[in-house]
């Protein structure tokens, strides 16, 4: 009933920039915390950046000063602006959103964590 669709990944040279987008749709009553995670080949999935419902961001040490996470509640979207990209940023990036979903009448049912399908980011040296 709820979907997250990501876009914006691709191939970029080291030092370049990319902007990832994630848009939620479906029976959404409320969007809560939103975040971006990534998983590189052979590595564990890690939290990259998050933003609370109040708009407070937090970042992994590895991306502080280079990445910026923002949200647009009206568009039901979360974004990740990635600057000064490095080869070690190469990974599949996933958006994760805690969503209070509703039934067909619009009544809130429960909160659940939803994951996007993932988008590949490749940074060449």
Image: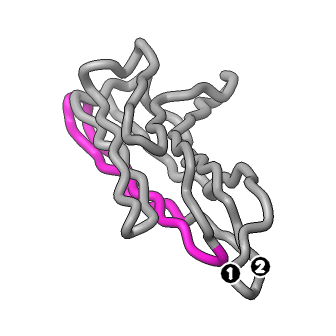
Examine the residues drawn in magenta and state their main secondary structure: strand
Which sits in the foreground, 40 or 28? 28
Label 2, residues with CA under 10 Å away: few <14, some 14-19, many ≥20:
few
Residue identifier under label 1: 106
Residue 24: say if magenta.
Answer: yes
Please give left or right for residue 105 compared with residue 124 in the image: right
Distance Cα–Cα, label 1 vs label 2: 5 Å
Whether residues under marks 1 and 2 lie with C-beta atoms below 8 angstroms apart, the answer is: yes
Q: What colour scheme has been applied to the protein in the rendered image?
A: one colour
User: Which quarter of the rendering shows the N terminus?
Assistant: bottom right
Element assignment for label 1 = loop
Give residue 41's mark.
none
The outermost residue toward the front is 107
Q: Which residues are magenta?
A: 5-27
Residue identifier under label 2: 103
**Marker count (numbered):** 2
The structure residue drawn at horizontal position 25% and vertical position 20%, both measured from the top left corner, is 65
């Amino acid at each position: 009933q709820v979907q997250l669709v990501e876009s914006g990944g691709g191939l970029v040279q080291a030092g370049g920039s990319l902007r990832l987008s994630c848009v939620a749709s479906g029976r959404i009553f409320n969007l809560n915390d939103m975040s971006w995670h990534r998983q590189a080949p052979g590595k564990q999935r890690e939290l990259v950046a998050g933003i609370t419902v109040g708009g407070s961001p937090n970042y992994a040490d590895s991306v502080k000063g280079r990445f910026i996470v923002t949200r647009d509640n009206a568009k039901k979207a979360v974004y990740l602006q990635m600057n000064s990209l490095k080869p070690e940023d190469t990974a599949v990036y996933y958006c994760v959103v805690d969503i209070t979903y509703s039934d067909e009448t619009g009544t809130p049912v429960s909160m659940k964590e939803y994951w996007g399908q993932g988008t590949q980011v490749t940074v060449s040296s």
